[in-house]
Image: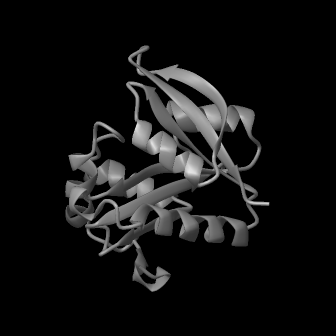
Amino acid sequence: MNVSEIGDLSSVDAAVLLPLNNAHAEETSALDEASLAALLDMAFYARGIDRGVTALLIALDQNARYDSPNFLWFKAYRESFVYIDRIIISSAARGQGLARSLYEDLFAAAKHAGHDRVVCEVNIDPPNRVSEAFHAAMGFSAVGEGTIHSATKTVRYLERSLR
């Protein structure tokens, strides 16, 4: 996989992106055309593989007007950041290094734009051990925890320094 296979999602039709996103709504969140368009409009980074059908990553910087409780946690505790809102790899494409490639591309874009950290959260209740292991391998470390969605989910907040 080389970075030339990673492409911008801003001009990709929502009908192409929504099936991948909504197939993984339990891990991220379901979107409709309007909410996807709003997310892409405020994105710092919105790129995918195979026009977002195989894999996609959407990230926002601290200036986004986003009301996600996880994004707002970082906004309260960090002055500057790039927040990974969602990373989705189709079931058929897992284990091929696509998430790693998208993260490395994001890190380069964030660093080039002058950011010094990338942040995200991982579910710990219910647990997402695969995601925890992936983020540890990518150099993320824990910076906090939160309970969201009326106490039905607990997340661990992670960050990776780009210095």
Residue 22, image x, y percentages: 23, 47
Nearer to the camera, 130 or 159: 130
Asked which quadrant contains residue 156, the reply is top right
Residue displayed at 65% across by 37% down: 74
Residue 6, image x, y percentages: 43, 77
Residue displayed at 41% across by 15% down: 150
In the drawing, does residue 55 fall left or right of residue 139? Answer: left
Nearer to the camera, 63 or 60: 60
In the drawing, does residue 94 fall left or right of residue 84? Answer: left
The colour scheme used here is: one colour
Residue 40, image x, y percentages: 43, 59
Task: Give the vertical position of 105 relative to 155 (above or below).
Answer: below
Q: Is residue 67 visible?
A: no
Q: Is residue 25 visible?
A: yes
In the drawing, does residue 47 fall left or right of residue 94? Answer: right
Dividing the image into 4 quarters, which one contains the C terminus? Answer: bottom right
Task: Give the vertical position of 120 relative to 73 (above or below).
Answer: below
Residue lying at the far top in this picture: please name it. Answer: 151
Residue lying at the far right in this picture: please name it. Answer: 163
Nearer to the camera, 52 or 144: 144
Residue displayed at 43% across by 36% down: 129
Task: Give the vertical position of 4 relative to 50 (above or below).
Answer: below
Residue displayed at 56% across by 23% down: 146
Residue lying at the far bottom in this picture: please name it. Answer: 4
Residue 71, image x, y percentages: 56, 38
In the drawing, does residue 141 fall left or right of residue 26? Answer: right
Dividing the image into 4 quarters, which one contains the N terminus? Answer: bottom left
Tag count: 0
